[in-house]
Amino acid sequence: MGNKGNEGSSGYLRRLRFVPDADRSGGNIHRIYDDSWHDDMPQALKDYYDHDIESIRICKHSINPFNPIDPLVFHAFVVFETRTRWWSIEKNSTEVLLQCSYDIEYVRKKIQRNKRHLIISDWFISEGNFL
């Protein structure tokens, strides 16, 4: 799927990792690179994306396990709800990660099916039809 060597100057791989069914302990993980975005992304999301966004929240968790309440060292990500699923989207140092689940806790408290560090805050942004 695309040019896997397409790496930016900072080590960023310019790819999207899509984790469907984040509430399952296995399953597919799709890696979509920038030069194959238009071909692969619609197919990967076709069976998962259901309707317009109904609510959005921003979550923040500690990235310092030795001082989990450090206000200056954290990672933020977006969680949004569609009619039947919860989604999270975030960028790390190498890629953009998109996850979906029927249960919010699997995209809010887990990353790629692994437990996140302590969630520091969870800001509810808005409800309504966004798209």
Image: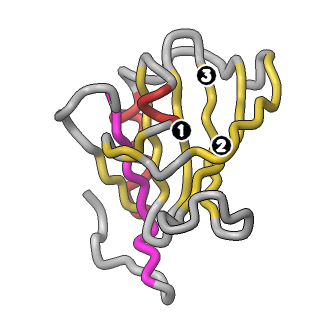
Q: Quadrant of residue 75?
A: bottom right
Image disc number at residue 81:
3
State the separation of the CA atoms marked 1 and 3. 9 Å
Image label count: 3
Q: Secondary structure at mark 3?
A: strand
Q: Quadrant of the N terminus?
A: bottom left
Q: Is residue 103 above or below residue 16?
A: above
Mark 3 and mark 2 residues within 8 Å of each other at the beta carbon: no
Q: Earlier in the sequence, mark 3 or mark 2?
A: 2
Q: Secondary structure at mark 2?
A: strand
Residue 51 screen position, x and y as percent:
58, 15
Amino acid found under the numbered disc labelled 3: Glu
Q: Quadrant of residue 41?
A: top left
Q: Marks 2 and 1: which is nearer the front?
A: 2
Image disc number at residue 88:
1
Q: Which residues are magenta?
A: 11-21
Residue to which mark 2 is pinned:
59
Which residue: 41% across, 61% down?
15
